[in-house]
Image (spheres, grey):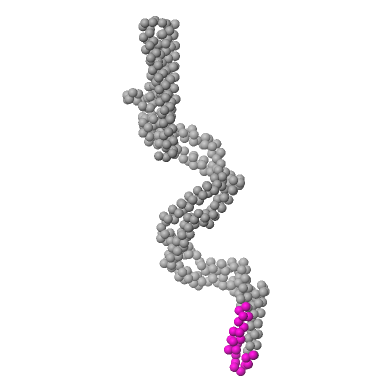
Amino acid sequence: MTKFSKFENMNDEAKRKQLRKYKMFATGLFVLMAIIFIATTLLEKSNPFHWLGYVRAFSEAAMVGALADWFAVTALFRHPLGLPIPHTNLIENSKQRLGDNLGSFVVSNFLSPQNIRPYIQKLKVSNFVGEWLAKEKSQEILIRNLSDIVLDILNKLDDTSVSQFISKKVSEMTDDIKLNKVVGNGIGYILEKNDHQRMVTNLSKQIKEYIIENDEMIKERVEKGSYSFIPSFVDHKIADKIASGLADFFKEIEEDPEHQIRNLITQKIYEFSTDLKEDPKWDDEFKTIKNGLLKSNKLDEYSSDIWISIKKTLMKELLDEQSSLKGYLTKNLNEFSQNLKTDENLQNKIDHWVRVTAYKYILKNTHQFGNLISSTVGNWQGKELSEKMELEVGKDLQFIRVNGTLVGGLVGLIIYTIANFFL
């Protein structure tokens, strides 16, 4: 049994005690009137005091009023004395109609646009959400629950199905992608940004340094390719000149951003980029490469490896309380809560969205509220409904019995007085 159920039972028990108390009071008043009536009737036979008639008339009429109102009140909830008198036990016999009428009454009088609009306009949830998110405990609860949900989803996912899905989507996307145009546009982008000049500079520097560091190899090459009758020192002199000239040449390219070789290289790369995008042979070449790399079995293998890696990483991040993912979420929650508390524009947008959504939802589903009330009341057992209603209003209805006793007595007294003085 939940805490709410225990509280509800305790509340019902208190109402039952209160109802019994007022029933006993109303019944006791009726018994008192009956005793007075019997006593005055007996006294009148032996003591003909004039005032006894007034008391007897009051008590007699009071008993009639008490009995009439007892019958009326009891007839609402059950058959009086268990007798199946027509038009009694009204609540049990009319529970469905009561439910329908109650549902219609609530919808018409409480859920009409003019009634709910003032309350909807007062809704302001942004500050509340901002304050709640700013609390460390709230952030822990939110992140823990989100982590549990994602972990549950990850554990329930079939790895084979997911990897096949990834493989299928990759295959569909690559079918529509013209890799030759992608590569050509990529090269064109690099040229537009002039980023290729850094590669030319670095490559020139590397070639220059390689020539300087390997001058002996150049000498050997020159000597090997020279004629036998040419002296070695001549070959060495020629090799030095070649090495020096080449090193100076590449040094010039390295240091001069406007060198003609740089312009020539740029022009050739532009031509290659255009050729990649427009020449059909490159489309066929890249399709061959793509089909070789993305064969069905290889693509399935890649997709499986990708999914397993993603899943393993996610689960590790979600299980680790100090993970970078949770740290990132906490940081963003702090920023969001701070914005909710300080950014009036954001507050107005969120509050306006909540108000409009709530207003539309309530108006759209007002009939559902009526149906809920109607079906709930209609599904109650008749006896259960009568008991619930009696617990809620039975105490006040006992005052009808009390008032009926007193008013009945007064009416009887007035009639008796009129009869004695004027008739």
In magenta, the rendered stretch is 209-233
Q: Position of residue 62 (x, y in %)?
A: 41, 16
Q: Measuring 63% from the left and 88% from the top, which residue is drawn there?
A: 236
For the residue pair 181 and 67, the one nearer the viewer reads as 67
Tell me if residue 105 is in the magenta stretch: no
Asked if residue 196 lies left or right of residue 397, the reply is right
Asked if residue 133 lies left or right of residue 28, the reply is right
Q: Residue furthest bottom?
A: 229
Quadrant housing residue 131: top right
Asked if residue 155 lies left or right of residue 330, the reply is left
Q: Position of residue 384 (x, y in %)?
A: 37, 32
Q: Position of residue 351 (x, y in %)?
A: 56, 43
Q: Measuring 61% from the left and 79% from the top, which residue is drawn there?
A: 210
Q: Measuring 63% from the left and 83% from the top, which residue is drawn there?
A: 243
Tell me if residue 213 is in the magenta stretch: yes
Q: Is residue 271 above or below residue 415?
A: below
Q: Is residue 93 above or below residue 309?
A: above
